Image (cartoon, coloured by chain):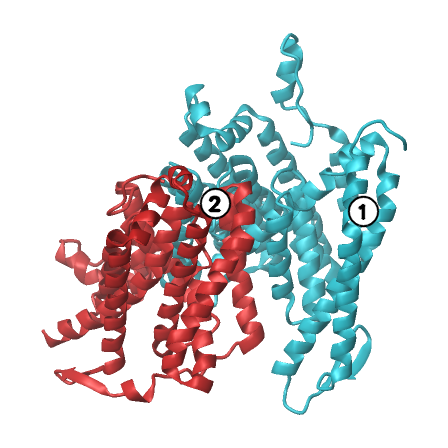
Amino acid sequence: MTDQITTDPSKPAQRMRAGSMSLTVGPWIVAAVALMLMPYIFTSNSALTIMNQMWITVVFALAYNMLLGQGGMLSFGHAVYAGVGGFACMHIMNNSDLFASFPLPVLPIFGGLFGMGLAMIVGAFSTRSAGTVFAMISLGVGELIAACSVIIVAFFGGEEGVSGDRTYAMPFFGNEFLQQIDVYYLTSFWVLLSAILMYLWSRTPVGRMANAVRDNPERAEFLGYSARWVRFYSFVASGFFAGVAGGLFAINYEILTEENLNTASSGVILLVTFLGGVGFFFGPIIGAIVFTLVQTVLSLQTELWAFYAGSLFLATVMFFPGGLAGLMMMHVPVFRLGKMKMLLLPYAKTLIPAAIGILGLCCLVEMTFHYRHAATGDHEMTLFWTTFDSHTLMPWIIAAAITAVGLGIAKMTAPALKEAWDEANTAGGTS
Amino acid sequence: MELILVNIIDGLVTGLLLFMLSAGLTLIFSMMGVLNFAHASFYMLGAYFAYQISIALGFWMGLLIAPLIVGVLGAGVERYGLRRVHQYGHVPELIFTFGLALLIEELVQFIWGKNQMPYNVPEVLNFTAFSIAGNSIPAFKIFMIFISIGIFIGLLYILTKTRVGMIIQAALSYPRTVEALGHNVPLIFMGVFGVGTALAGVAGVIAGPVLGTFPGMAFVLGSIVFVTIVIGGLGSLWGALVASLLIGWMTTFAKSYNIRMSDILNGIGISTPENLDDNIFRDFWTVTSPQIADILPYILMVLILIFRPAGLFGKRES
């Protein structure tokens, strides 16, 4: 949805192209090369693990955005489709005769098919309306299936989940996927393939109608399209790709548990997608990368990472409903006008003090947390390479002062930034 | 027979507790058209505030003050959060309340930690009111029933008989007209949001000692509350009451009577397959009613949404 479609109605050829399945090859080749080269830049095993997790989240978030961004349907139980796809893949892995008859890279297709099957059953009644009712049904069905995981032990494996071994598949050109790096390339291949397919889907007439139904279902119905069926197709396609993500998860981790199904993981994927930006196709990709990094890096540093992630999410909803992608795309007109230079200085003046102020605030939060929850007698804490006693007054004064000064300067320079922003977005004038 | 009576009382307590949450939620929904995902979080905040106050001032001051604080917080959320997000549409509003629920849970863990708080039934009410065939009914349960019924009657009286209630009802249906008549509709919305969350706070105060005050308590009850108002019909107060009681009794009875799926299936003429251990439906055959008690409301909701999408008492579909 990045390209603005301005068609001249007098030229039918151009009108056709807007909806046709054209693909700008450039970004995809860049993405493919980047995926190939990543393991040579980040060679450590933990980096590979993080990247695998990242790409799986990318597939899942893109699938989720087919519903939320492109179809306008808010689902609170989407982890179920990924989870069921994953569980199905685990069972195929454990069925050694069947599993030995095809190579491992084919496995996510089965996950996708199972996810799609479940989406067809649920979608049959849940896609009647969008909005709140759809959200409620998705939540109910999600909870229902998550709760079933403890009861239907044969399929969901109860509390310990289902585990398997990916190496029993038919060797793929002699490769048995023993190494993490092999799995990385498998995941990368599937990420690229699913992303391309999902992008093409958004260009098909069905994908275009999904946008129309999102914006104005009544009008779409007057044009002769059944809003319900359009929603159903989006839902089923989304279920398929969520299932693919589940299959990739099964290959990567070789275990699936109740955690893959529950509302918490459905919430995480909503968070990821919205953080990245639902308005653009590449939004969820950014969201998945940023969120996975925040999760892994921040959770090593602090116990409160979920608190920060939650605050970030809420701030995004309140102030930047376009998400990170929306924030980036806001600057495209400025770039086109060639006025990016005018913004650099005001940005530095506002954002650097604001960042320092927010870090100061985080220090205060961390100190409060340490003060309340550290073991008794443990007064030492380390923040930003400084070790101090959290029970004395001095660190509190310093942190509070940093916060106040940083945010104060940011607040003072904000009007100048706004002015510069307006100026930069105006065509012509002195530059 | 006696067991049935005990279960009826237990189910009534659960149902009325659910109703206190769903009443506020359904009012807020019919007002703003948005489901407040954080509603159960305000219930949790109510319990935690009451615990903190009860340490210093005792249970009764907690019952009085905690809902007030929760109500003010709720009004603040409406004024500074929801009203801002409202311009972006319904889906961002839902997402906002969802994020708020996550954040409140983290915040509670941040302040009070992850363990259960020692928030107990007050001494005055810590005795057995009466007993039925050896099953003692604690006085606190009776107290809970009376508080909830009192609140329900009060709410019904205010909404249907007083001038304030009339204006609220008018503002629900024709906000623009009411505004043109000189009433401050945004203020009414804020007030209703505050009262709704305060009700959730009351529920938290009286449920905290019984169900436990821990960071997961919002999550445990949260989705059941949504199920309740969907079953009852979105925006219907009577529907919320009926659905709450239905769910309360359904889960209580399913938990106390051990009905096996195989008994039901045998009863309707399907015989149990031999060598059950190899059968792929073995889990289905061995399911018992206490196992599925907690998911019965969800099954009911899915059925209701398929066969009567407007809910039991709802007037409109969305």
**Which of the chains bears the disc numbered 2?**
A
Across and down, in percent, residue B290 comes to: 27, 68
Which is more foreground, mark 2 or mark 1? 1
Q: Which residue is mark 1?
A: A416
Depicted A33 relative to depicted A379: above or below: above
Relative to A423, say whether B117 is above or below.
below
Q: Visible in this render: residue A172?
A: no
Colour chosen for chain A: cyan
Identify the image quadrant of the C terminus of chain A: top right
Can you name the residue that lies furthest to the bottom here?
A377
User: Going by the image, does A359 lie left or right of B307?
Assistant: right
Which chain, by letter, is red? B
Q: Position of residue A84 (x, y in %)?
A: 47, 51
Q: Residue furthest top?
A: A10
Residue A397 falls in image quadrant: bottom right
Split into 4 quadrants, where in the image is the N terminus of chain A?
top right
Chain letter of mark 1 equals A
Other-residue count near label 1 (Cα within 10 Å), few / some / many at <14 / 14–19 / ≥20: some
Q: Position of residue B228 (x, y in %)?
A: 31, 55
Q: Earlier in the sequence, mark 2 or mark 1?
A: 2
The label number, if any, that marks residue A115 in the structure image:
2
Outermost residue toward the front?
B182
Q: Amino acid at mark 2?
A: Gly
Q: Nearer the viewer, residue A321 or B194?
A: B194
Res. A178 image quadrant? bottom right
Q: Residue at x 67, y 45 (%)?
A: A285
SS at badge 1: helix
